[in-house]
Image: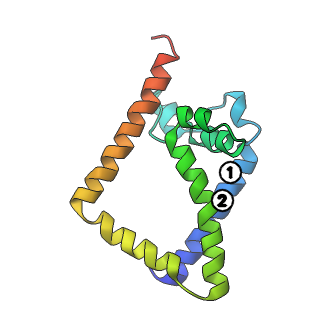
Amino acid sequence: MSPRRFYTFAIILFGGAYLWLWKVGGSESSGGVFCWFRRLFEVPCPSCGSTRAVLSAWDGHLLEALKLNPLGVLYLVLLIVFPLWLLWDLLSRKRTMYRTYDRCEILLGRRPVLYAVIALILINWGWVLYNHFSHTSL
């Protein structure tokens, strides 16, 4: 991916993420299910609950956020750090974020690293499923 395309994609991605949080911020707690995977299979996906987790962590309820979905805390950190990093790159006319993305892409091309990331996502999914089934009657 070219640097120009990367930065355009990043701006759209983070802008969309903030719009999503703004749009569902009040309605997410009302119990609506926004996940197509959960609607289709009636089982939460690895990322289910992450919007509520981001909003909880933002409000200072870190333990609640971790219980909902640990990925939500990571997402919040990324939603704070990456736009600032993006702004820095655009103002300084440097490509530090792009170079880091490029290195991460190479790193994820190594099978042990890729398998470790997949394992962490599956562990997180196990946590989400555990919380889902421990709070619903079968």
Kindly identify which residue carries mark 2: 16
Where 1 falls versus 60 (above or below)?
below
**Residue at 36% of width from left, 69% of height from top?**
105
Determine crowd level at label 2: few under 14, some 14-19, many 20+ residues with C-alpha closer than 10 A.
few
Residue furthest bottom in the image? 93
**Numbered circle sitting on residue 69:** none
- In this rendering, does residue 73 appear at all? yes
Q: Is residue 108 above or below residue 120?
A: below
Kind of residue at badge 1: Trp
Name the side, left or right, on which 87 lies relative to 100: right
Identify the element where label 2 is drawn.
helix
Question: Which percent across, then down, holds residue 64?
Answer: 61, 32
- Say what secondary structure mark 1 lies in: helix
Which three-letter amino acid code belongs to the residue tagged 2? Gly
The answer to whether 63 is drawn above or below residue 75 in the figure is: above
For image coordinates 73% across by 42% down, the residue present is 25
CA gap, disc 2 and disc 1: 6 Å
Q: Which image quadrant: the C terminus?
A: top left
**Mark 2 in CB contact with mark 1 (< 8 angstroms):** yes
What is the x, y in percent for residue 111? Answer: 22, 59
Residue at image mark 1: 20
